[in-house]
Image (spheres, rainbow, N blue to C red):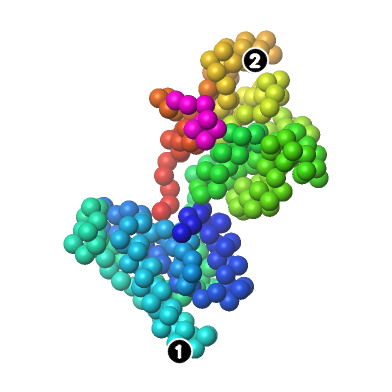
Amino acid sequence: MKTRNALALQQTVQQWLSQGTAAVLIEVVRIKGSTPRNVGARMVVSADEVLGTVGGGHLEWRAIALARQALAECRQTGPQTLPAPWQQDFALGPSLGQCCGGALTLAFTPLSAALVSSWPTPPSRFHLDLHGAGHVGQAIIQILGGLDCTVRWIDERAAPDDLTSYAQAGLPDTATLASLPPHIQWLPTDQAEAEVQDAPAGACHLVLTHRHDLDLRIVRAILQRGDAGFVGLIGSQTKRAQFRRRLAEQDLSPEQIETMTCPIGLDGIEGKEPMVIAVSAVAQLLRLTPLQGP
């Protein structure tokens, strides 16, 4: 089973359609009480694969089984036959033994091009300009691949056509970059601080490049704009003090400098492993952004 963000799920399903893969879309259309997902949550089930989630547990196991039973019955009728749409109610406590205690209705609809093209795209939780493609940057991208957000992943260490040198330096290789989901844009550049001007207003920024002087130039450009939703700099309390002093020397006001967060991540989460830092930093961004969509 693979969980993906809405755009990546839609992209993969379109590939299924082009390959002639029969599948059923399962969507939460009504809820009552406590349920694992909200209205609009969806998953797609074929004979061999499951994409997305409507909440997991016995509910999801039962929904997958029903979809596959309908697909199997249609295969016996003919290769071009698809099941008729239907809806089914589920009481999570009594019938499925789940502790949520609520109830929901799932809609089962055969996959079609018209259905996929009409899917609503949930609003982005945030836009992130992620400066740096080292170990922490790559760990952050792994997490963001499954979130409804938009990302510009920016790195200054190689020319745009020099992907071999990225892999040799421990940076993302050709296969990794080619497999990025549609909501994550890879942006190699020879002047990272100049890319700041193209960030949307209210964007979040995480700065974690391979050089402190480059970090300083990027952070200065972000603070000078004055419209960021979040400015995070990887580092220590010592690095924070040094940057505050250097930014003041470059005529930034105390109010501008105060908007910089360093170190990044939620308080109380300890550890310097790249994935620990990445989880903490992404959780910090999610705490800043209200939940929208399913």
Q: Name the quadrant of the C terminus.
A: bottom left
C-alpha gap between disc 2 and disc 1 = 71 Å
Which residue is located at x 24 percent, y 56 percent?
A: 98
Say above or below: 54 vs 275. below
Residue 165, position as x, y percentages in the image: 78, 39
Picture disc at residue 167: none
Amino acid residing under circle 2:
Leu
Residue 18 visible in the picture: yes
Whether the residues at callouts 2 and 1 have beta carbons within 8 Å, the answer is no
Residue 16, position as x, y percentages in the image: 57, 70
Given this view, does label 2 or label 1 mark the residue nearer the observer? 1
Which residue is located at x 62 percent, y 29 percent?
A: 207
Residue with the mark numbered 2: 247
Picture disc at residue 77: 1
Residue 230, position as x, y percentages in the image: 54, 30
Residue 55, position as x, y percentages in the image: 36, 56
Q: Secondary structure at mark 1?
A: helix
Amino acid residing under circle 1:
Thr
Q: Is residue 271 magenta?
A: yes
Answer with left or right where residue 253 lies relative to residue 93. Answer: right
Q: Secondary structure at mark 2?
A: helix
Answer with left or right where residue 154 lies relative to residue 52. Answer: right
Q: Which residues are magenta?
A: 270-278
Which residue is located at x 58 percent, y 42 percent?
A: 141
Q: Is residue 117 magenta?
A: no
Report the front residue among 227 and 204: 204
